[in-house]
Amino acid sequence: MSGAADASQTNLAELSFEAALDELENLVAKLESGQASLEESISLYERGALLKAHCEDRLKRAQMRVDQIVESPQGVGLEPARLG
Amino acid sequence: MSQEPSNAPEFSVSELSGAIKRRLEDDFGNVRVRGEMGRVTIARSGHVYVDLKDANAVLSAVMWKGVAAALRFRPEEGMEVIATGKISTFPGSSKYQLIIERLEPAGVGALLAQLEERRKRLAAEGLFDPARKQALPYLPEVIGVVSSPTGAVIKDILHRLSERFPVHVLLWPVLVQGDKAADQVARAIAGFNRLPADGAVPRPDVLIVARGGGSIEDLWAFNEEVVVRAAAASTIPLISAIGHETDTTLIDFASDRRAPTPTGAAEMAVPVRLELQERVNLTGARLSRAMVRGLERGRIELRAAAARLPRPDTLFNAARQRMDVLELRFGPSLRNLMSIKGHGLAAIGGRLRPQVLRQDITRKQALVGGLEQRLTAAFTRRTLSERDALTRAAQRLDVASQRLSAALSRHIDLKSRQLAGQASLLEALSYRSALARGFAVVRTEKGTVVRGKAEVRPDARLTLTFVDGEVKVRATDGPVQASLFD
């Protein structure tokens, strides 16, 4: 396997949104170029589907939450923000 | 003149002077005084003597050499300053004076001058180097905000964040104005940086230090060295958003990005979720289209490859034709052989019937159609193995055909030789050999062989055939008188 193929084995869970989207876009460009063999195309497609799901998942779980730091002798903790 | 003796204790001059000195130093041990500088005298010793004054009073002051050397500006007569230090007396001449420990310019112009001086000094240290700037994360999970919990700034930031891309915000509440502001801001920046990556309080991916607009004095905390150093030391990328766009504070030079407003900081910190969603959708659609096109191309290539496979009957037509010719020429004598070879051929040919191959190809095409969902990759290998099988069959057929051809040749030779044998036998049995032994053949005029005298009419014309030629004669007698010579 080539180096590129190794990079594409990167564990999805550790992949940032940006890296996943970049990889997806590169992979689609390769697929669109028609230079990949059919077998290669299929693994590209499978990887692409996973990357797309990974990106969508990240976008879906975006949620606003606001906490406030409280300092105590034990260190710093969190409490719900009290904005005046 | 009589004088009542007093009970008041008597002091020596030195005692009293010492007591006054102690009292003054206790009560005015740390004072801050604002005034205009009078004449400035720099003694040869390096100490600086100066009068501070306002409209009604004058205060003598001294800066020892060490303090004077640490000044970041040149004290000049008429300059408005704020001096910090302690009052002390000079018992030798019954005077008191301010011993200056710190001297700062006062007023906007002086502040700006001081700011510029500080900026140059910190820049010389490399705190503002472009090489130190860190890139902001593309999509932060947690954003730390150092700002006042009250007022519009934090609300503006939160509002814009939730509009663009909702995130987890940690607010470190600080004073953003006044004496304590700089220390609190610096502590907050350092505190965020001290958070471990996997602790109970999540470590922010990016920091925003923000304050609303105000006068240069209001924003002064963000010019303080402790804040600038904390921002420069932050390993978490930091966005500064202090005051309005036209306000510049020193933290802006040390931060990784300077935002014109707190709202602008929120825009720098996160991308727009809807835009990302759109990008993911578009890319996903391109992925599907490219795959479908790839499959279609594969299908076309398969059809083309199938079309290039040689038609199976062409592989054995020539051989079969040759066999047909031989069969016609040699007939039943070859039937046996033909039937044996024919069976072999039929077995091979049967496997090679176009219909069977076509069915196979149709099945393969159906399989490829299935790939659109399952995307399995087997057919390329399968096509190759079919082609191999066909090639092997063709090779077998070739061998069989060569063997058949050789066998037929041998038979033709044999039959030719047999035919030659029969011809010589026939020759041996011919009447001509009898002529050679002295016999003759008698024929009538019509060529009919005459077998006895009864067949000879009187006066008949006859032909005698000898071994070396013919003689025409006339019969002089009827059947009774069969004399040849008369």
Image (tube, rainbow, N blue to C red):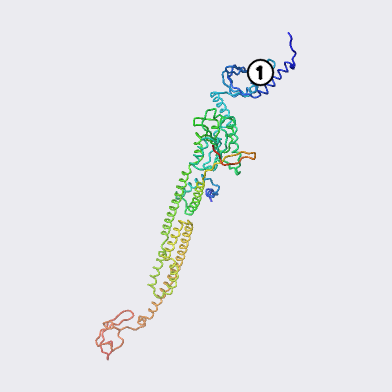
**How many marks do you count on the picture?**
1
On screen, residue A21 above or below B18: below
Question: In front here: B461 or A2?
Answer: A2
Q: Determine the residue located farthest toward the bottom in the rendered image.
A: B480
Give the quadrant of the N terminus of chain B: top right
Q: Is residue B274 left or right of residue A68?
A: left
Relative placement, left or right, of B442 versus B364 is left
Give left or right: position of A55 versus B420. right
Dividing the picture into quadrants, the one containing residue B97 is top right
On what subunit does the disc labeled 1 rest?
B
Q: Position of residue B174 (x, y in %)?
A: 57, 35
Q: Is residue B371 above or below residue B219?
A: below
Left or right of B321, for residue A64: right
State the quadrant of the C terminus of chain B: bottom left
Residue B480 or residue B38, whichever sits in front: B38
Residue B132: x %, y % from top left: 56, 35
Residue B457 image offset from top left, x and y in percent: 25, 87
Q: In the displayed structure, would residue B438 be above or below residue B305? A: below
Q: Position of residue B151 (x, y in %)?
A: 52, 35
Q: Which residue is mark 1?
A: B96
Q: State the residue lying farthest toward the left.
A: B459
The front one of B432 and A34 is A34
Which residue type carries mark 1? Answer: Tyr
Q: Quadrant of residue B107?
A: top right
- The vertical placement of B289 against B434, above or below, is above
Q: Hey, which residue is sitting farthest top in the picture?
A: B1
Mark 1 nearby-residue class (10 Å; few <14, some 14–19, many ≥20): some
Instruction: Tell me the element at label 1.
Output: strand
